[in-house]
Image: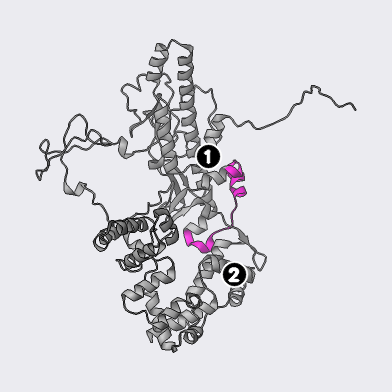
Amino acid sequence: MAIGPRLELRQTQALVMTPQLQQAIRLLQLTNLELSQYVDQELERNPILERADADGVGEGAGIDEGNLNADPQVDAAGEAISASDGISDDGTVGDTAAVELDGMELPGANGLDGAEGPLDTDYSENYNNDSVADRPAPETPGAEGANSDGYEVGDWSGASGGLSGGESATVTLEQVLSAEITLKDHVLEQMNVLLTEPILRKIGQDLVEHLDEAGYLTEETAFIADRLGCETELVDIVLDQLQHLDPAGVFARNLGECLALQLRDRNRYDPAMQTLIENLHLLAAMDVRLICETCGVNAEDAEEMIAELKALNPKPGLAFDYDVAAPVVPDVFVLEKPDGGWSVELNSDNLPRLLVNRKYYAEINEAARRKEDKAYISECLQSANWLIKSLDQRARTILSVASELVRQQDGFLANGVQDLRPLNLRAIAEIVGIHESTVSRVTSNKYVATPRGVFELKYFFTSALSAADGGEDHSSEAVRGQLRDLIDKESVHSVLSDDKLVDILRGAGVDIARRTVAKYRDALGIPSSVQRRRAKRMEARAVG
């Protein structure tokens, strides 16, 4: 056969990732915050898109009259998915999407595959996103230019959400946020009093900048000296002075030094305690006998030393950590119905409410003369329709997957973790009628609020452990719960070894190996039976 170039005609099948499909997939895996940021970017980029208020009316005037598409809007965030008449009389949607599982019936799959139609179809579904920026500014009574206490109020024209055009408002002390003192601010105040020479203050400021949130020094003094062009001994001298500042233990370079600084501050750093600090691995193993031999003390003194170390703060800098952890905002609510069953609702506060300003589109399209302008306007309309359609499909898919998860894990909602069933992505995908990867994207970083707490949707997917009697499989999460309960009920005279835990679980019908029990115990942060026995004995002696 001769080797040479030639033409061939082949027919193959391939998945084409269009920009619209990529957008829909990307929106599925976004969290609430990421989705809000993405929508804000699209609102800035696309002049045809507008954010709707709670009544389904856009920010611009006359949008309803100028809407070229008189068809009613699709109910994307209003009534139950299984209901065919989920659109209100005024053509807008409600505030909460819901599916009522009476007898655990599946919701309808309407809209799950996406609405069909040309790209210029009006998909102006509204989603509720009552953000602070969209709320009307509250009326603030009071005299102009001064509040009730007589303080002058300046021009807030540059402030976000503030006044513009020289307007004034009443400001009370309750509206002024107090600035919290950080760890570095607290240390700098003391350092400026302690160090008077400029070169020492310069070194001290550099040391302060390398403090982490726990109060530890994160860089070697040799590197700091080399960067500042001074002797390492001078940096060590400044560091030694800073280690006497409040809080005790700050500027330590490791855990042992941090504990030693706190003990020196309490005048309790004797030779025996110093030896224990140098052998912290003995404390981690709770080996009291070896601690007594190493430190040269008796058992009673060793227990007192251990109790003193436990009373110290291994991360003194965290006392100045004022960062408030943001609470998890659930995407789905699961509520128990009075007559039995569960009601599954989307959190409407997380759903953006958007619409296409058809009146503005008609005006600028009519005014456009150049071909490039008309192409840009048409692209904006197409992009707006696809975005709203993707948001609608995202909301429906989340609700359908969450509803099926509630149906599958009904026992967990009713009785607790012991009735959590083994479940995988494929089972949900086959029932809902979507791909496994779609289920994975929908359940990642999405949270559901249930009567038993707030859980990530991924929590309901657990591996299976075979039953010892050949019956129904057990969920690994339920087995972890049983393991935790057994260990919590231990006493000082009945500490359960891993082998004993295996026997108990097998007696309860769980076919489990010893190494699996050890793995689950480590994942729960539970020490071994030897360490638990020592800890319980020390607690019993302390109480006695």
Residue 79 pos. (x, y %): 43, 38
Residue 96 pos. (x, y %): 40, 41
Crowding near pointer 1: few (<14 within 10 Å), some, many (20+)? Answer: some
Callout 2, which amino acid? Val
Is residue 78 visible in the rendered image? The answer is no
What segment carries the magenta color?
414-437
Give the vertical position of 387 relative to 221 (above or below): above
Task: Work out whether mark 1 precedes mark 2 in sequence or the reverse, and give the earlier one.
Answer: 1
Q: 234 or 314, which lies in front?
A: 234
User: In the picture provided, is 345 more to the left or to the right than 173?
Assistant: right
Could you give the CA–CA distance between mark 1 and mark 2, rounded to whole angstroms? 42 Å
Give the vertical position of 314 relative to 369 (above or below): below
Give the vertical position of 405 relative to 147 (above or below): below
Local SS, label 1: loop
User: In the picture provided, is 303 more to the left or to the right than 468?
Assistant: left
Q: Name the disc covering residue 517, or none.
A: 2
Based on the picture, tell me whether residue 426 belongs to the magenta stretch: yes
Is residue 244 visible in the rendered image? The answer is yes
Based on the picture, tell me whether residue 415 belongs to the magenta stretch: yes
Residue identifier under label 1: 108
User: In the picture provided, is 475 more to the left or to the right than 332?
Assistant: right
Q: 392 or 154, which lies in front?
A: 154
Callout 1, which amino acid? Gly
The residue mark sitting in front, 1 or 2, is 2
Q: 85 or 92, which lies in front?
A: 92
